[in-house]
Image (tube, helix red, strand yellow):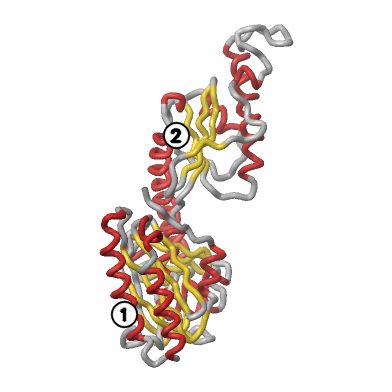
Amino acid sequence: MLHVDIPTRAEIEALMLNHGPARVSLVLPTTPLTQAAQGDRIVLKNLTEQAVEQLASHDKREVLAIEELLHDLIDDDDFWEVQANSLAVFVSPEGLRSFRLPNHLKPAVEVSDRFHVQPLLRTVTVNQSAYVLALAQNSVRLVGVSSDLPAVELNLDGMPKDVASSARKTSIKDRSPSGRLQGSEGMKVHQVQYARKIDQALRVLLVGKETPLILAAAEPMQSIYRELQSYPHLARTAIPHNPETQSDAELASSARSILDELFRDELAEIHSLYALRTSQSRTTTDLAQAARAATYGAIQLLLIDIDDVTPGTVDDDGAVTFADGPSAKSYGLVDEIASRALVTGAKVMGVRKSEIPGEAKLAAILRYPF
């Protein structure tokens, strides 16, 4: 099982705004197999040595503080017992933050006056968690799904047990208070009441959230619930089987496939929007133009290649200066553009190069022609 630390948007923004003379960002692929973790520790040690070399001209006390923090992490046996597919480490003389990530990332060493947060953006771009509403006539349960923990059933106040109890009956085969026989029409009335009570119970949990809700239900309950539910982030794709025959783990496995599908659909919609905005002169894949647009808050949506580390600097007016190679006096241009776009309200998504229009280093949709 993967052990991951999913950063929040607030944590990413805090790292973006953390500037100082010595900021080190390290990324390495890791293995969740504890017995193989020794090799990962060696890789981190080698990356640490590379970072220290790049810090040669910095204050020796600051370099020593960074080196000690990294070696403390390397020597932490408990930390290395539980890993994921990649590790991102951000360290300054004041402290160290690490994130165990589910994505497969390439090794990287970035030393500058700011952190290189690009690797984190893939993790927050693709949904890592969801709720599964396992809905049947005779039972309902809500299952929480995440990338690092086993699926777990969540208990909610006000959640009905089944169609009959939601109608305050011991059986839905008896007569209704109005005397109408419980034929197909009467059955649907009770099913609708049942679905409405479920939606009401979920509102308390889901209000203000954007976590996908995935429905696991057979017909007719699937259609009935969709017609009246109020949560805007209910996935279009459902798990179309009777959930009473599936374990929480099986539902979680199906949900993760649907999360991947949701991301593919979102990318397809973005590509369509990008084509439209291109015809309106409201897109760019040029680093220099994107840097100026990000600086002045003109970017609405930005796709970035999470692996690109083109070195350079961006001044206060957004003008780009390219560097001959990485050094402590430069930083990743794509990372800096992403940081500026994010803090001015843009939606920033970390993706693979193959997922960017034209396979560019980045692709920006602008709020207006720039």
Residue 139 position, x and y percent, is 54, 24
Q: Judge by depth and name the residue closer to the eye, 148 or 200.
A: 148
**342 vs 200: above or below:** below
Residue 194 position, x and y percent, is 62, 25
Name the outermost residue toward the right.
Answer: 178
Lateral position of residue 307 relative to residue 203, left or right: left
Q: Residue at x 45, y 91 (%)?
A: 59
User: Residue 254 sits in which quadrant?
Assistant: top left
Work out whether residue 370 can be spotted.
Answer: no
Q: Residue at x 66, y 41 (%)?
A: 204
Which residue position holds label 1?
Answer: 49
Badge nearest the viewer, 1 or 2:
1
**135 vs 169: above or below:** below
Q: Residues within 10 Å of mark 2 (few under 14, many from 20)?
A: many
Q: Judge by depth and name the residue closer to the eye, 242 or 22.
A: 22
**150 vs 98: above or below:** above
Q: Judge by depth and name the residue closer to the eye, 181 or 162.
A: 162
Which residue position holds label 2?
Answer: 248
Q: Residues within 10 Å of mark 1 (few under 14, many from 20)?
A: some
Under circle 2, the secondary element is: helix
User: Residue 27 sits in which quadrant?
Assistant: bottom left
Task: Identify residue type, mark 2.
Answer: Asp
Q: Residue at x 40, y 59 (%)?
A: 78
Residue 234 position, x and y percent, is 53, 41
Under circle 1, the secondary element is: helix
Work out whether residue 295 can be spotted.
Answer: yes
Task: Identify residue type, mark 1.
Answer: Glu
